[in-house]
Image (cartoon, rainbow, N blue to C red):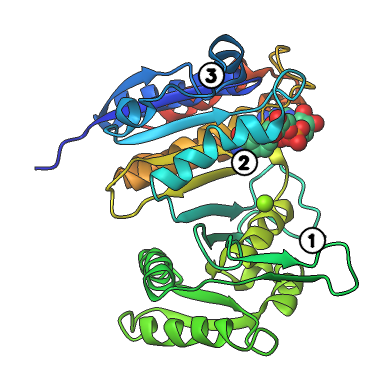
Amino acid sequence: SRSRHYRIAVIPGDGIGKEVVPEGLRALEAVSKRFGCTFAFDQFAFASCDYFLEHGVMMPDDWKDQIGGHDAIFFGAVGWPESVPDHVSLWGSLIQFRREFDQYVNLRPVKLMPGVPSPLAGREPGDIDFYVVRENTEGEYSSIGGRIFPGTEREVVVQETVMTRVGVDRILKFAFELAQRREKKHLTSATKSNGIAITMPYWDERVEDMARAYPDVRWDKYHIDILTAHFVQHPDWFDVVVASNLFGDILSDLGPACAGTIGIAPAANINPERDFPSLFEPVHGSAPDIAGQGIANPVGQIWSAALMLDHLGERQAASAIVAAIETVLAQPRLRTRDLGGPLGTVDCGAAIAQALLEAR
Ligand code: NAI
Ligand code: MG
């Protein structure tokens, strides 16, 4: 049978990354006790601004060998703008992981949790529960194009959208498979084939074609403009939403914003073929304004551990983490300060680990 031992590359990074990552590991240790899977956590100090200040680079030359063989990367946050410019720290680490490890799926759950005020009036936990699946390697974010006659009246600027059959089909396949595993089995595709009249009709064509392989998944599509309105007015309509790089970028910020605060949102950067490790991280950054105070909300990091377990095939354990987060957030006295509660990072993390163990 399949091995249930997992080697995890742990990269805390900077700022509150170093405070919330240990709480993610605490939840994973509780999972190990309850569900029997085991973890080896290998800590790496690179991909941080401290490492940069000491070595002049964000990562060692052999970083790919050091973490490429792990089952997953558990990442905190990178960035310390006071000492290293953000484009240097981000491009020297996180962007390298995403590209070199072909993590072409960016996955974000959008779920309204108890105790988290939604900016959408009248919405309760249960009303909002879907995923945004963003294509992360091609589409609108290409480097094909240029500027000619710069600074003159004849100035011309062009940037091409690139959609490849391989690139479009693989993200659609991931999204349809995710939809198939969910109760509602419903997929929504973001398009704009009325305006972007070459690449987007192609995207639609590939969706229609892919859908034939998943007859049990109900699917629909909306133009991106009205789709953003529906996210706000009818978040209960959605289950799995798949989108190109640009549209997915917008939806994957809008969705979680409709479901609450930056402190709790998780993200996964996935290589579904498992040729390379996938990366799991909170959506938030290193929060220099609160770093070192022990008050950061650990939920985003802990929820990203649930996404990691799901990817590793530990589905029951993944659901248990999400349930433990819900149990804790439902109690005002167990929330962190950003949610109006009294607890610090460690106590909130410990409460979630405790809830995991008590639920058995
Ligand atoms: P940020 O997400 O670090 O902080 C934005 C605001 O949200 C701050 O007021 C912060 O205190 C608050 N916040 C964030 N996470 C929180 C948590 N867990 N609990 C309570 N409050 C929380 O974004 P910002 O300030 O734009 O960027 C700071 C640094 O992080 C920069 O160097 C930036 O490049 C980097 N960054 C890194 C990311 C990553 O590693 N994936 C993502 C976003 C930013
Ligand atoms: Mg974005």
Q: Which quarter of the figure is the C terminus placed in?
A: top left
- Where, by quadrant of the figure, is residue 37 drawn? top left
Q: As shown in the figure, which amino acid type bears the numbered disc 3? A: Ala
Q: Which quarter of the figure is the N terminus placed in?
A: top left
Residue 283, label in figure = 2
Q: Which residue is mark 1?
A: 122
Compared across the picture, whether 1 is left or right of 137 comes to left
Mark 2 or mark 3: name the one nearer the start of the chain.
Answer: 2
Mark 1: few/some/many CA within 10 Å (<14, 14-19, 20+): few
Residue 293, label in figure = none
Q: Is residue 284 above or below residue 19?
A: below
Q: Position of residue 281 (x, y in %)?
A: 53, 37
Q: Are marks 2 and 3 in contact (CB under 8 Å)?
A: no
| Cα–Cα span, label 1 and label 2 | 25 Å
Compared across the picture, whether 312 is left or right of 118 comes to left
Q: Position of residue 304 (x, y in %)?
A: 50, 38
Q: Is residue 189 above or below residue 274?
A: below
Q: Residue at x 35, y 19 (%)?
A: 42
Q: Is residue 246 above or below residue 156?
A: above
**SS state under label 2:** loop
**SS state under label 3:** helix
For this rendering, which residue is in front, 128 or 92? 92
For this rendering, which residue is in front, 161 or 302? 161
| Cα–Cα span, label 2 and label 3 | 21 Å
Q: Residue at x 66, y 83 (%)?
A: 196
Q: Indicate if the residue with disc 2 has its beta carbon within 8 Å of ligand 1.
A: yes
Q: Position of residue 266 (x, y in %)?
A: 56, 42
Residue 350, label in figure = 3
Mark 3: few/some/many CA within 10 Å (<14, 14-19, 20+): some
Q: Indicate if the residue with disc 1 has its beta carbon within 8 Å of ligand 1.
A: no
Compared across the picture, whether 246 is left or right of 271 comes to right
